[in-house]
Amino acid sequence: MSSQQFLLLPPFTFEVRTDIPLVADNLKRLYGNRLVDMVSYPDYFVSVQKAEGIRRFYRPQARFFADQQEPFQPLQQQQAYAMLEWGMNWCIATHEMQYVIIHAAVLAKDNKAILFPAPPGSGKSTLTTWLAFHGWRLLSDEMALIQPHSRTVIPFVRPICLKNNSITLAKQWFPDATYSTVASDTHKGDVIHLSPPESSWQHNKEPAEIVGVVFPNYRSDTEMDIYQLDKTQSFMQLAQNAFNYGVIGHDGFATLCQLIDRVAGFEIFYNDLALVAEFLQQELIDAGG
Amino acid sequence: MLHDVLLEHVVVHSFSDGSGTVFFNQVTGETLGVSLTAQQLERLVLNGETDISVQAQDLHALSRMLKLPSQSLEKANV
């Protein structure tokens, strides 16, 4: 039995079809009332479907489609929900050229936003989780949508993607939060999605002004080391984490240059999240904007 | 001026803290950052001044952003 529902995820809407109960159950659990039965004009039409063929009897698989495209190889069916989340990321990263898109978490206080650009394994999502459940507003765990020629970042609130050890940590810290089922043995290891706090969902149409860029690096043996980056270093690191800046050309380049010229950039090595929060508050939120 | 020797599709920006300059080729998407101000780059590129230190790989990359043949830059920095 296939279901068809719509996700209201400002600034976009998705039509989601699936015949996999695991996907439908996780969508309902994580998105709550953002999942609706009718939308006039969805921006994206995505589906996660059971794969056909003989393999379905001994190792069932799932396939992701965005319109007529199938950007990924089929995955194990128990990974289908994670596949849907990654597929929605793919839709935005490959189609939305009106924004400069950075692979970064975005969190804000008082509408002052900090970008956390980082490659996988840097502890970005663990830090994001901790901050989002300690009074910071989550705008995105995965991608910063920046209005060209501005410091304005548009929220794209979605569940936070946690991997491996961070799953255990998050469940210890926030046992009452809402988690998806585990997708085990993915190319990223074990993966789970965590619904952000209700306050982040409620403000998912409110842009924020970027006041700082922080490149996080989790180090188990380092409580807190902070390095202020010069602007050339900040730019080069930010550009490496940009999804579409090479494609949109001069507007992307100019936007990142203007942004870096106006805000401070730091690289941090840490294992104490409370210290990170204190640093962010004092150095960027209280002083910034 | 530095702009006069840039390739047609290359844009450039020098940062306000004087930490360096970044180049972006809008055709290839290549981005380069060097720890030289616009003034230092002009002295290096236009005047061939030799007292400006640049790493060899940066010099090579920089030559791909300019109309000048790479040898003229490398000679300047020998």
Image (cartoon, grey):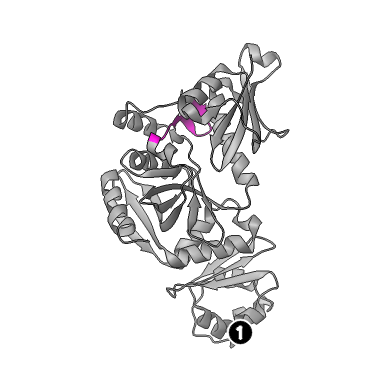
Quadrant of residue A53 within the rendered picture: top right
Q: Which residue is mark 1?
A: B1
Q: Which residues are magenta?
A: A184-198
Residue A289 point in image, percent of width and height: 38, 61
Q: Residue furthest top?
A: A57
Q: Quadrant of the C terminus of chain B?
A: bottom right
Q: Residue at x 31, y 61 (%)?
A: A287
Residue A22 is a magenta residue: no
Residue A187 is a magenta residue: yes
- Residue A72 visible in the picture: no
- In the depicted structure, whether residue A57 falls above or below residue A48: above
Residue A17 point in image, percent of width and height: 63, 25
Query: Which subunit holds the residue at mark 1?
Result: B
Q: Is residue A14 left or right of residue A119?
A: right
Q: Amino acid at mark 1?
A: Met
Viewer-closest of A9 and B3: A9
